[in-house]
Amino acid sequence: MARIRLKKPIYPISKELRLYLKRSNREMKVPITYQDLMRYRSAITLVDRNGKDTLWETLVYDEVDRNYIDDCLREVYALLKVGGDVSVIKHLFIDRVDLCMFGNTRPIRVRIVNKINDLFDYFYIKQADASRIYGMELEHMLSPNKINYLVKGNTLIEEHIQGIPGDVFNKEYLTRNDFNHVRLAKEFVKFNERCLVQLLGDMRDDNFVVEAIPDFDEVHFRLRSIDFDQECFEGSRKIYMPQYFKENNPIVQLGMKAMSSTLELQYQKEERIRMTNRVIDTQYDLQQMFKAMQNDELSTKENTLQLREELTDLYEDDSFMSCESSGDIVKTSLEMLFKYPVRTQKRLVNA
């Protein structure tokens, strides 16, 4: 089973990464920062509809500051959604600002509500972490999912990713018989492969969501990461393979019952081919990103040495042994897509 041994530190944004973010219009001026929002007066425990502690706290600000904070947050939301045009979101108001007490970077979540129809949305304000930014960039370029975020100095602003939380899906939906279990198992295989290739770690069930997409005959699924903090930090390759987390055993066991090894290899290859095409389509952006990533410190020396050895063993390819940094390892991992369209039955069994 996969296990996280150490708490990952927050890695600062380097000059090279900052330049990449500016070129890709990710960095821009925003009217409020993470540190501004941490100047709250008090906090109230936030409970769910059943009265259970959510491990989030609702922040209370001084009344003289609240209107200014709300206006700034609405402007931030406009930057995320409509290019900064606040005139089209005048009917929105800030309902709540919550602080997560257990997250690695103690994220802040903002709930914004539509006055006209009571629909609501969320966005997040966090401490900027280079690991997370690289993880989101790789997800944006190499997966079927698009990631919308902004950076200002040491503040990271992210759009909310919708879906059923993986742990909730496992408890409330997995035992139902009104969907095709093979379709879910298929998507887990593809999700597992994307995480491994991107070296996105810690995809236990509370770090991803499940999108259920009704079609004319069946429900389709997509698994999406919502946590990118563990990008290429850990040394164990199992951290980058969701199949090894005990929290994901319900989906893994469903897949073992519903799917043969032949199908598993087919879906693994399908995803690797799709990722190969995405690497080709985004090669310029990837090259620019790796100019920063290969020079950035994103892990410990011990983890880097361990990971390159474990991936060498997994692929039976010594290309990883020349890697000196986490960025080198991620770049080599993408190169494996072209060398090994499928990791072969032997590699799959011995992973």
Image: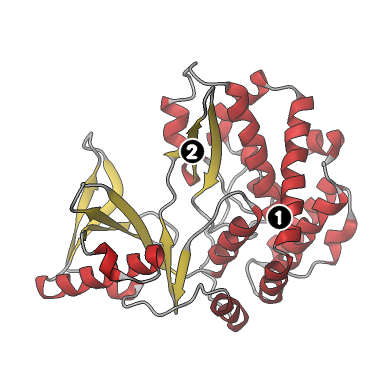
Indicate left or right for 202 with 308 as reference: left
Residue marked by disc 2:
211
Mark 1 neighbour class, 10 Å CA radius: few under 14, some 14 to 19, many 20 or more: some
Badge 2: few (under 14), some or many (20 or more) residues near its Cα, within 10 Å? Answer: some
Of 261 and 23, the residue lying toward us: 23
| Image-quadrant location for residue 33 | bottom left
Q: CA distance from mark 1 to mark 2?
A: 21 Å
Which sits in the foreground, 92 or 61? 92
Which structural element holds mark 1?
helix
How many numbered callouts?
Answer: 2
Q: Position of residue 261 (x, y in %)?
A: 77, 26
Q: Tell me which amino acid carries mark 2.
A: Glu
On screen, 351 above or below 10? above
254 over 193 or under it: above or below: above
**Residue 320 lies in what quarter of the image?**
bottom right
Please give left or right for residue 179 compared with residue 58 in the image.
Answer: right
Looking at the picture, the colour scheme in use is: secondary structure
- For image coordinates 57% across by 73% down, the residue present is 24
Secondary structure under tag 2 reads strand
Q: Amino acid at mark 1?
A: Arg
Point out which mark residue 278 bears. Answer: 1
State the mark number for residue 300: none
What residue is at 27 percent from the left and 55 percent from the top? 111
Viewed as shown, does residue 328 lie left or right of 160? right
